[in-house]
Image (cartoon, rainbow, N blue to C red):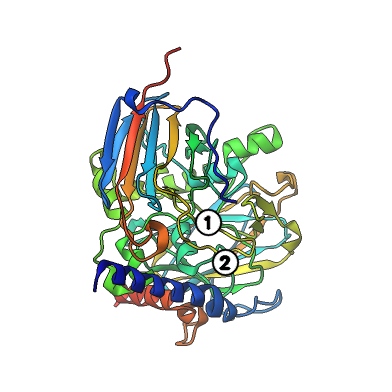
């Protein structure tokens, strides 16, 4: 093939993937979990704890286990980073998560990828579908600007949590924030859609490798509410039901099917 | 949306540049930029994505942070006036001139591994920006773990109100440039993107030019 023919073939493949990724794959996503849905089976809970506002927790998950994060009050946001235990340079990657799924929307049926073309976490349950991949968590500067004084914040929580794992600032990637309804207007300005937050919203994140997460329960920097109104969240580590062959998280698009094939290959 | 903007200040004369270099297609480059120096990146032929990372020269664990930059700015695209903010909340540099109009910082860099996921296993053995970054960072004592979400100059990644995220055809014409003025001493690292599987380089990677000016005499 000539150079021009290769370019044409690559463009056709790209447009086909885009049509699927932003069309059929989006339409095939399962509906959100009901607020009273997806009870955790008796005996499946490994540990449950309450994380107060402003604080962080470190959670280790084996492949196949899941973390349920529950926003009890409907006023919390939880920022999450994490690393693979086989190599901490392999970590949660927001950019690849958006790029590979052709969307900044995380919802039931979506996944979070690592930087190595593998699946890190699957959103096997999600009542909310309103999460943030772009803006990140609070920082000393963002709390000072919002409240006139520095408050407990996600940047410092991540640093402290990472340090207790022998990791440092170099290891901290951009974060995902759950229960953070951020959208964009037509000019790319960020909007906060506070009406999409409900008491009892939860996500279930199934680990696709052995990994460690840090969850920081701090108000999102775009949330106009002051930290005093923030609420605790529940973190439940549990044994998730085994993935079935037609698990939508695994089969939603050709890209995600490949990402799972590469993940499974590493664990074979 | 693609309105062309430039700064009002007098554009520097290329004859006064203290450094000029053409980065070949698909290759990497890095240089120490002193506070006050301005780096220009010229998209010589148009539609060429330039992936970039900045590290504080005095303490490289302080580095460019895409999320801090977007939070401070309140919007999703990089353009004239954007302050490039570090993971410690400090402004490392700012965009002092821009004839393209919009740049990305949410899509990250291409890698052999993500190419295999996105475009199929047969694309795994194609050169990628992360290979460039790893090799270039090794010259500064840095490694894979130091690669964070980068800037993508001249790369068009619209994010629509429904959340659709698309690497689209470039809006940069041949000769477009972006000027970045350092506000601290920074190691500036570039991967001239080798991607041929999406439209970020018009399916044809091309060279870019980098020029550096000292700060104007007081």
Packing grade of label 1 (10 A; few <14, some 14-19, many >=20) is: many
Residue A259 at x, y percent in the picture: 39, 73
In this rendering, which labeled residue sits more in front, label 1 or label 2?
2
Q: Is residue B137 visible?
A: no
Residue A39 sits above or below residue B73 on the image? below
Say which of A268 and B97 sits in front. B97
Q: Report crowding for label 2: few under 14, some 14 to 19, many 20 or more residues within 10 A (C-alpha).
A: many
- Quadrant of the frame with the C terminus of chain A: bottom left
Label 1 residue SS: strand
Quarter that holds the N terminus of chain A = bottom left
Numbered-mark total: 2
Q: Where is residue A151 in the image (x, y as percent from the top left)?
A: 64, 38
Q: Residue at x 41, y 58 (%)?
A: B200
Residue at 66%, 35% (x, y): give it. A145
User: In the displayed image of the protein, which residue is found farthest to the bottom?
Assistant: A245
Residue B55, image x and y in percent?
38, 37
Please give the chain letter of the residue carrying mark 1. Answer: A
Asked which quadrant contains residue A176, the reply is: bottom right
Q: Nearer the viewer, residue A139 or B111?
A: B111
Q: What element does badge 2 sit on?
A: loop
Residue A80, labelled with which disc? Answer: 1
Q: Position of residue A20 (x, y in %)?
A: 50, 77
Residue A86 in the figure: left or right of residue B10 = left
Q: In this view, does A257 lie above or below B149?
A: below
Q: Mark 2 points at which residue?
A: A106
Q: Mark 2 lies on which chain?
A: A
Viewer-proximal residue among A59 and B99: B99
Q: Do labels 1 and 2 share a chain?
A: yes
Q: Which mark is residue A33?
A: none
Q: Can residue A186 be seen in this view?
A: yes
């Amino acid at each position: 093939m000539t150079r021009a023919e290769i370019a044409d073939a690559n463009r056709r493949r790209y447009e086909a993937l885009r049509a699927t990724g932003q069309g059929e794959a989006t339409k095939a996503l399962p509906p959100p979990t009901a607020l009273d849905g997806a009870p955790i089976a008796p005996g499946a809970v490994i540990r449950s704890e309450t994380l107060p506002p402003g604080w962080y927790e470190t959670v280790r998950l084996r492949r196949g286990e899941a973390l349920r994060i529950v926003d009890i009050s409907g006023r919390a946001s939880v920022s999450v980073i994490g690393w693979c235990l086989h190599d901490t340079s392999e970590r949660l990657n927001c950019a690849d998560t958006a790029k590979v799924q052709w969307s900044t929307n995380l919802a039931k049926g979506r996944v979070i990828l690592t930087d190595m073309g593998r699946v890190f976490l699957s959103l096997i349950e999600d009542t909310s579908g309103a999460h943030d991949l772009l803006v990140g968590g609070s920082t000393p500067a963002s709390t000072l600007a919002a409240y006139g004084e520095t408050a407990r914040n996600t940047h410092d929580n991540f640093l402290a949590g990472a340090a207790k794992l022998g990791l440092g600032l170099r290891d901290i990637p951009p974060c995902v924030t759950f229960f953070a309804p951020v959208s964009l207007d037509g000019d790319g300005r960020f909007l906060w859609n506070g009406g999409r937050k409900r008491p009892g919203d939860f996500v279930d994140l199934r680990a696709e490798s052995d990994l460690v997460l840090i969850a920081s329960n701090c108000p999102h920097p775009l949330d106009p509410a002051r930290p005093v109104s923030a609420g605790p969240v529940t973190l439940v580590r549990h044994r998730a039901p085994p993935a079935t062959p037609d698990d939508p998280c695994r089969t939603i698009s050709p890209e995600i099917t490949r990402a799972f094939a590469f993940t499974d290959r590493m664990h074979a | 949306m693609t309105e062309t903007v430039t700064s009002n200040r007098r554009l520097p004369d290329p004859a006064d540049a203290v450094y000029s270099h053409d980065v070949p297609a698909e290759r990497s480059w890095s240089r120490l930029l002193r506070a006050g120096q301005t780096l220009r990146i010229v998209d010589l032929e148009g539609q060429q994505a330039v992936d970039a990372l900045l590290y504080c020269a005095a303490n490289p664990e302080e580095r460019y942070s895409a999320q801090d930059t977007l939070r401070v700015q309140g919007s999703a695209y990089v353009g004239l006036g954007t302050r490039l903010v570090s993971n410690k909340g400090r402004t490392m540099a700012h965009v002092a001139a821009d004839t393209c109009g919009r740049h990305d910082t949410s899509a990250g860099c291409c890698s052999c591994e993500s190419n295999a996921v996105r475009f199929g296993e047969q694309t795994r053995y194609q050169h990628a920006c992360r290979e460039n970054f790893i090799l270039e960072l090794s010259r500064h004592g840095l490694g894979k773990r130091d690669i964070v979400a980068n800037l993508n100059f001249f790369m068009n990644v619209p994010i629509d109100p429904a959340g659709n995220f698309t690497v689209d055809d470039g809006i940069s014409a041949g000769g477009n440039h972006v000027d970045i003025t350092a506000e601290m001493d920074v190691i500036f690292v570039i991967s001239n993107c080798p991607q041929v599987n999406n439209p970020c380089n018009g399916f044809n990677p091309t060279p870019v030019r980098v020029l550096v000016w000292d700060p104007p005499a007081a």
